Amino acid sequence: MQVIAYDPNVTTVQWVKLTGLYELAASADVVSVNASYSDSSHEMLDQAFFDKLKPGAFLVNNARGELINEIALLNSLQ
C-alpha cells in the first residue's frame, strides 16, 4: 500500500508521499480526514475536491463536519 497525504504544515515525512489536496483526491482509494478545525480549514473539502475525487473512493471524516462543504458532498453523491 502506498500512503499519500496532504498537510500544508508538513514538508517531509519519511514513509509518506506528500501531495496537494486535489492530487490526493484524484489518487486515493480512501481519504481519511484528520485535520483540526480553523478558519483556514473551513470547508476545505469543497466542490473542486469532490469533482476530482476518484470514482469509488471512500471518504472517512474523523474530524469536524465543518471541514466539508455539505452541499458539495451532496452534489457528489447525487
Image (tube, rainbow, N blue to C red):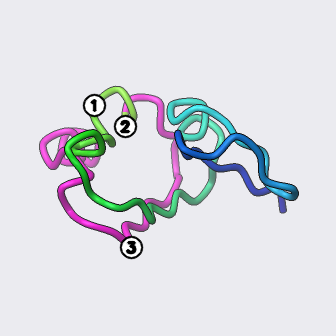
Marked residue nearer the N-terminal end (3 or 1): 1
Q: Residue tagged by mark 1?
A: 47
65 shown above or below 52: below
Asked if the magenta segment contains residue 75, the reply would be yes
Disc 3: CA contacts within 10 A as few (<14), some (14-19) or many (>=20): few
Residue corresponding to mark 2:
50
Which quadrant is home to the N terminus? Answer: bottom right
Residue at position x 31%, y 40% in the image: 44
The amino acid type of the residue labelled 2 equals Phe
The residues bearing labels 3 and 2 have C-alpha atoms spaced at a distance of: 17 Å
In the image, what residue occupies the spot 26% across and 52% down? 67
Does the magenta portion include 24?
no
Image quadrant where one finds the C terminus: top left
Q: Are marks 1 and 2 in contact (CB under 8 Å)?
A: yes
Q: Which residues are magenta?
A: 51-78
- For the point 51% across and 31% down, which residue is it? 22
Q: Secondary structure at mark 3?
A: loop
Residue at screen point 64% across, 49% down: 5
x%, y% of residue 52?
47, 30
Q: Which amino acid type corresponds to the residue marked 3 in the rendered image? A: Asn
For label 2, the crowd category at 10 Å Cα-Cα, with few meaning under 14, some 14 to 19 and many 20 or more, is: many
The kind of residue tagged 1 is Gln
Nearer to the camera, 77 or 70: 70
